Amino acid sequence: MENDQPVEVNITPKGLIYLPETAKGLKCVSETKIETMFYTPGQNPEENLNYKFLLPALDQIKGQDYDYVIGFDSDLSRTIIGYPNAEGRFLVFNAHQQGAIFTHTFLAGNSFPSMDEEKTKLVIKGIVLSQQIDKIVTKNNGAYKESHAGYEDLKEKILEIEDPIESYLAFDERNHVILDLDKNKNIELQISLIEELVKELKGKEKSLFDFHVDLQIRYKLYGEKTFNITSEGENKKIFDRFRTKPPSDAMHEELVSISDYKKQLFFNKLTGRKSEPELRQMDIVQLDYSSGLKISVELTEGGSKLFLHLSDYTDCYNKDSFANARKGINDRLLKIVVSLGKMVIDVN
């Protein structure tokens, strides 16, 4: 007779925390039971927190059964999460995907339980991030505000909070994540949030990748792309073209609203309503279309750099359709940027 006793499954997450050597003395690091790896600041590129930044940590655990890796930049203000995909290959979430995971877990997970029904959990997100974040917040009874990107801008928004709130989460497209302005506490809360999420997922025989796909199915699959379209001597001209002659008809898109942070003007084309944005003046213009497409153009570093941020969504009905849906939205964004190149970026 076969033994019908239930098999005990280990649901303890196996993770690696990747930190700068300057963080060795932090309380949250010295007391954590999670494996930690330290790096020398400056030894790997961190201007853009991406796969290359996390590569030494991923090499360290290659071939081993890890559930996640969390890396922090040398200033301890930006975060990147590595995860094994369906084939077991480690990849990293981009800032948009990471923001969605943090938001849903912060609002609906167990790490930040609601203690006071009179108070609200607040999410502050960078304006470039996709509308998926907005959907997650509203569906989970949270409140949200928007901010320009950067630690100081997010911090300023946090310090401006007047309404009674229970807790807050702030992040942007540059991988800044803030759950507490004390950096030691901030790291501790982020690690705890991901650890609790992965533990819950393992109990359901799911992974971080599965959770990511579930979010895309539930809130529609959002795709985001950022392009450096810097053209020496032409940056301001290209930027102004997006502001004064925003692309619409030639793209077969209906332009709904323009947020011109340089001119400090918000204009809803459908209603004719004009108002002043709540955020400070900055060389950014955002164009929103009825299809869900969002185009953000950003002039930085005194006009020496110009970035184009695109966001759009598509339907993803189940896990089997995820790969095709993701390819479809990526292809659409690439076609849009090619069209923009012909219509706007080529100013000669």
Image (spheres, rainbow, N blue to C red):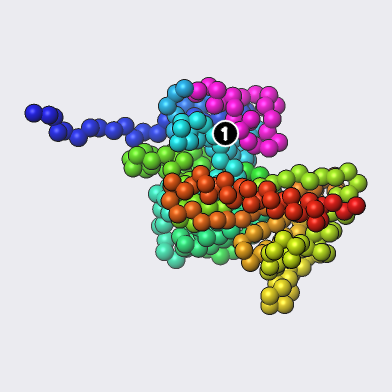
x and y percent of residue 44 in the render? 67, 26
Above or below: residue 215 compared with residue 208: below
Task: State the residue position of label 1.
Answer: 71
Which residue shows up at 61% across the image and 61% down it?
Answer: 292
Q: In which quadrant will I find the N terminus?
A: top left
Which residue shows up at 65% across the image and 24% down it?
Answer: 40
Choose between 202 and 106: the one closer to the eye: 202
Left or right? Give the position of 51 relative to 42: left
Q: Is residue 48 magenta?
A: yes
Amino acid type of the residue tagged 1 in the rendering: Gly
Instruction: Name the quadrant containing residue 48.
Output: top right
* Number of numbered discs visible in the structure rendering: 1
x and y percent of residue 221 in the render? 53, 52
x and y percent of residue 212 in the render? 48, 46
Left or right? Give the position of 194 relative to 256: left
**SS for callout 1:** strand
Residues packed near mark 1 inside 10 Å, few (<14), some (14 to 19) or many (20 plus): many
Above or below: residue 312 compared with residue 49: below
Which residue shows up at 33% across the image and 42% down it?
Answer: 204
Choose between 289 and 124: the one closer to the eye: 289
x and y percent of residue 109 in the render? 42, 50
Q: Is residue 105 visible?
A: no
Extreme-left residue of the structure: 1
Q: Is residue 66 magenta?
A: no
Above or below: residue 14 compared with residue 261: above
Q: Is residue 213 visible?
A: yes
Part of the protein shown in magenta: 38-62
Choose between 227 and 165: the one closer to the eye: 227
